[in-house]
Amino acid sequence: HYSAEMGKKGKASTSATDELERQIREIKLKQEAALRAVQQAAEELDCKQREVSVAEQDLSKAVKERDEADGAINSSIKIMKGDDKVIAQLAEGLEKDGYAYVDGFCGEPLATYVRDELRILHRDGKLHQSELAGGKTGENVRYKMSK
């Protein structure tokens, strides 16, 4: 009777041990999966932090260029104020052609700023090549729009 009871306890003990080992293996697998997920998240965070750093540098450069361009615009406005010849040329161009320009009006800093902004818009997919409708005479009604 004693050995039969010991056999039952031994089997029960082995069964409980097997179950515990299975649970331990499951926990280890879950830990490994969690560790991989944390490592992947850390890599993604590092990548995003580098992107933010580049964006901050771009922003800082753009702010500096904008400030320089603002100065150039203010200088250009001061130059044009009271210059009847320039104003007359602008009025004549607008009347004759529907547009007008003044050479050197904005200066190099503003031109550079606008060029760089357009390049950024194009790089980011926000600026697409298209065709203006109207043309010089206003008769050309063909146009292309990007979606």
Image: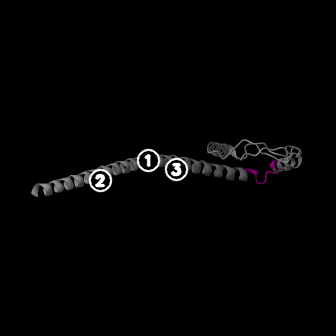
Q: Amino acid at mark 2?
A: Gln
Report the front residue among 85 and 101.
101
Q: Secondary structure at mark 3?
A: helix
Q: Secondary structure at mark 1?
A: helix
Q: State how far apart marks 2 and 1 are (Cα).
A: 34 Å
Residue linked to disc 3: 56
Mark found first going from the N terminus, 2 or 1: 2
Q: Secondary structure at mark 2?
A: helix
Residue 41: image x %, image y %?
A: 43, 49
Residue 78: mark in rendering: none
Residue 30: image x %, image y %?
A: 35, 51
Mark found first going from the N terminus, 1 or 3: 1
Image quadrant in which the N terminus is located: bottom left
Q: Is residue 50 left or right of residue 136?
A: left
Q: Amino acid at mark 1?
A: Asp
Give the magenta range: 79-86
Residue linked to disc 2: 23
- x 60%, y 48%: residue: 65
Residue linked to disc 1: 46
Mark found first going from the N terminus, 2 or 3: 2
Instruction: Select label 2 or label 3 by which is in front.
Output: 2
